Image (cartoon, rainbow, N blue to C red):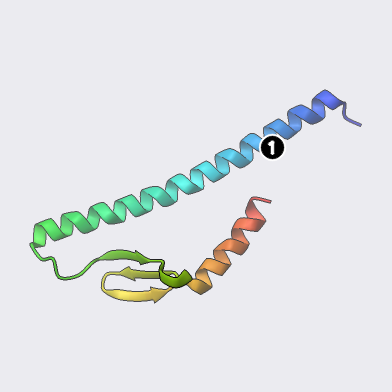
Amino acid sequence: METRMERTKRRKKEKRKKFFKRFIIYSAIALLFLGLMATEKSIKDLSGENTGKIFFIDLENGKFNLQLFGKDYNLNYFKEVLNKVYKKVFK
């Protein structure tokens, strides 16, 4: 049986762990997007073409479409899977 102080300390420690997990995942995703955008910009500058986009996210009408290297991907299925994983990991 744990005391009230031990229980409070344990809960605070669990909250900090959850916060850092979320922070690391969100930071990694943000760095991925920033890296893709920087790569697209540098490739366009080096090639001198402005014809197409290498990386583009379209969130039109609640659909999650990703354009990567000229191919379009519909990621609604992956969005649902990521939501399920997110709920299990951060619950």
Relative to residue 26, is residue 59 depicted above or below? below
Relative to residue 19, is residue 43 depicted above or below? below
SS at badge 1: helix
Percent across and percent down for residue 19 are 59, 39
The residue lying toward the viewer, choosing from 55 and 10, is 55
Quarter of the image for residue 74 reads: bottom left
- Which residue sits furthest right? 1
Counting labels gives 1
- Which residue sits furthest top? 5
Q: Amino acid at mark 1?
A: Glu
Percent across and percent down for residue 13 are 68, 32
Percent across and percent down for residue 59 are 41, 66
Left or right of 14 on screen, residue 78: left
Quarter of the image for residue 82 reads: bottom right
**What residue is at 23 percent from the left and 55 percent from the top?**
39
Left or right of 77 on screen, residue 70: left
- Which residue sits furthest front? 61
Left or right of 73 on screen, residue 80: right
Relative to residue 19, is residue 4 depicted above or below? above
Percent across and percent down for residue 30 are 40, 49
> Label 1 crowding class (10 Å Cα cut-off): few <14, some 14-19, many 20+?
few
**What residue is at 10 percent from the left and 66 percent from the top?**
49
The residue singled out by tag 1 in the image is: 14
**What residue is at 69 percent from the left and 51 percent from the top?**
91
Relative to residue 33, is residue 23 depicted above or below? above
**What residue is at 34 percent from the left and 75 percent from the top?**
72
Quadrant that contains the N terminus: top right
